[in-house]
Image (tube, helix red, strand yellow):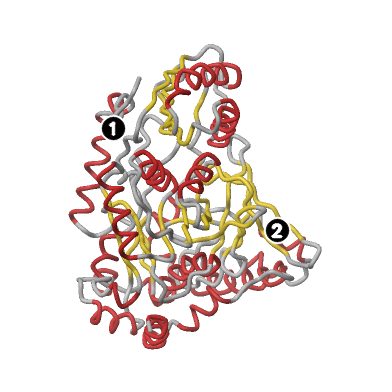
Amino acid sequence: MLKTLYQLAFRYIKVKKIYQEVVIDERLTNIRPKIRKDLEALLSHSNTNCEYFRGKFTDFLSGASELSDEEFFKSYSKLPALSKQDYAEAGQSVMTDNWAAVDAAKNTFSVEGKPLESLRRLRNDDYLMPMATGGSTSTPLSIMMTKQHMFSMLFTFFKCWYRMGWRPGERMLVFYPKNTYNIDDMVKFNRLSKWVGFKYHLFDKIDEKTVRGLIDDINQYKPKLLLVFPSPMNMIANTVKRFNLEIKHHPELINVSGETFFDCQRKHIQSIFSKSKIEDSYGSVELGELAHETPDGLEIFANVTYVETEPNEAGQPEMIITRLNNFDFPFIRYKMRDIANVEFRVYPDGTEKYLITKIEGKDSNFILNDQGNRFYPSFFNTLVNDLNLIVSDSVIEIKVFEKGQRELEVQFILSDNQFMEQVRTESKRLLSERLSSEMDFVIRFVDFIDHDYRRKYRVIQRIGDIEFAGGMVGDESKTSAINEVVSDATENSDSEFNTTSNSIA
C-alpha cells in the first residue's frame, strides 16, 4: 500500500522521471564518454544561460569536439576550480537566468506542518527551496534550489538506500540531532509519517536515556532501514551491551554517513547488530549523496557526479566535484575541501567504476605535531587497529583533542575496562613513536564522547573548529542556535577540551 502511495505521490508531484534518472539508472560501462557528454552539455548551457558563468567556457568548448576522451578530461581539469566562498559571493547569479532574476524571498517554499498543502506546492515549478551548508568558519553557503535541483539531490539519498535493498514504502527510522540539516522542517512536513514509512527520532545528546528511547522506538516501529551517523551508532551499540538492552528487532539495513567510519566502529556495531547489513555513504549538504560503499571502496554515482582530485597546498588530494545534469544551480569544478583518493577501475567483466578509496574529511581535519607534520584520521584509525591487536578489540571509539602543538588529549571508549592501563601505556608508546617523541599525550577513558551534536562531529577536534551541522537558513531560532554554538566554541575553547562525560582519567 505504501509503495503505491509513493508511486502516486511521485506521479502527482511530477518527479517520477527524475526518480528514474537518479535512482534507477546506472552507469557501469563505457562511463567516461557518457560523463564527457554530460559535461559538455552542462558547460554549454551554463556558458550561455548563467550570468556568473557566461562566456567563461567559450574557448574550452570551441576545441572540445576535436579532443580524445583522455585529452578532454585532462583539459577539463585545467579549468578554474571554484570554492565555497566563490559560490557564496556569486549568490543567485550562479543560477540559470530565469531563476537568477526572481525575488527569492517571495518564491521561497516553506513547510508549515501542512503536508497536503505542501504536496500541492511541490507539484508546481514556481518555487525555491533554501538550503545551506554549515561552513568551517560558521558562515554557510546558502543555495536556492529549484524543484528539479531539490528532487535530484533528494533522490541521491534514495539511491543509496535503494542500493542497499530498501524500496519506497518500506519503513525507515532516521536518528539525527535536533536543529541540524533542516531536520526539524522535515519532521513538520512528515506529520503523516505513518502513511509514507518515515519516522524521525531526534536527539540532543547521546546518553543512556537517549539510547533506551531509541531502542524502544526500533522495537515498536520495526524499521527496515536505520539512518544514523557512525559515532552515535557506535554509542548505541555500546549502550545496548553495557545495560543489556533487549533488541527485539534488528533493522535489516543500517546506513551510516556524514563522518569518518573507523574500522573499530564498524566491527563493534556489527557485533551488537549482528543481523543488520551496515554500509557507509559519502555526500555533502549542498550536493546530496555522491558515493556508496562497495567491497573495493565507495562507488561514485557516475550518472550523478564527476569527481577529480588535485593537490592542495600540503600536497594532499583534494576532491573537485562537478554535479552532472544540474542546470538550475550548476556546481562546476566545486572545491569541497575534502581530502580523498579517487580511482578509476575496469573489472574483468567490463564493469567500470570511479571509487573513493580513502576519505580523510575536510582538509582542516588533521593534527599538527611539534614539527609541523600533518596527521589525518587514517593515522588514528591505524593506531586503534594496532592497539586492538594487543587488547582484544577493546577499543571501540577514539576522539582526539588538539590542545596546542605540543599536547594532545586522546579519549578512548573501551568495551572492557580491564585493558585500561594497557591501552594507556601502549597508546602513549605508539603516539610517541609515530607522531612525536617530544609531545605530551593525555589519555582519558570515557563512557560517552561529550559533543554538541549541533556541531559537525569529527574524530579530530581542533581548537577553534566551529563548523555547524548544515542546512540552517532563514529561521530565527536556527540563527540563534548557530550564534550560540559559535559563541560557546570561541569563548570556551580551552575548557571544552577538558570536559568529558562520566570520564575516568
Is 90 situated above or below 99?
above
Q: Residue at x 24, y 35 (%)?
A: 488
Q: Are marks 2 and 1 in contact (CB under 8 Å)?
A: no
Q: Amino acid at mark 2?
A: Ser
- Residue 117 visible (yes or no): yes
Name the foreground residue: 368 vs 173: 173
Whether residue 375 is visible, yes or no, is no
User: Where is residue 350 shown, x and y percent of the image?
Assistant: 78, 67
Q: Look at label 1 and name its amino acid.
A: Thr
Q: Considering depth in this image, is 19 or 68 the residue closer to the camera?
A: 19
Picture coordinates of residue 337, whole percent (x, y): 51, 46
Q: Is residue 468 left or right of residue 290?
A: left
Crowding at mark 2 (Cα within 10 Å: few <14, some 14-19, many 20+): few
Residue 159 in the image: x percent, y percent? 51, 68
Q: Earlier in the sequence, mark 2 or mark 1?
A: 2
Instruction: Give the number of callouts.
Output: 2
325 up-or-down from 270: above or below: below
Image point 25% across, 75% down: which residue?
Answer: 192
- Which quarter of the figure has residue 218? bottom left
Q: For numbered disc 1, what is the local secondary structure?
A: helix
Q: Residue at x 45, y 51 (%)?
A: 258
Q: Which residue is mark 1?
A: 490
| Label of residue 75 in the image | 2
**In this rendering, the label closer to the viewer, 2 or 1:** 1
Label 2: state its secondary structure.
Answer: helix
Tell me the quarter of the picture where residue 339 sits. Answer: top right
Q: CA distance from mark 2 to mark 1?
A: 43 Å
Q: Which label is found at residue 348?
A: none
**Percent coordinates x, y for residue 239 in the rendering:** 35, 42
Q: Residue furthest right?
A: 348
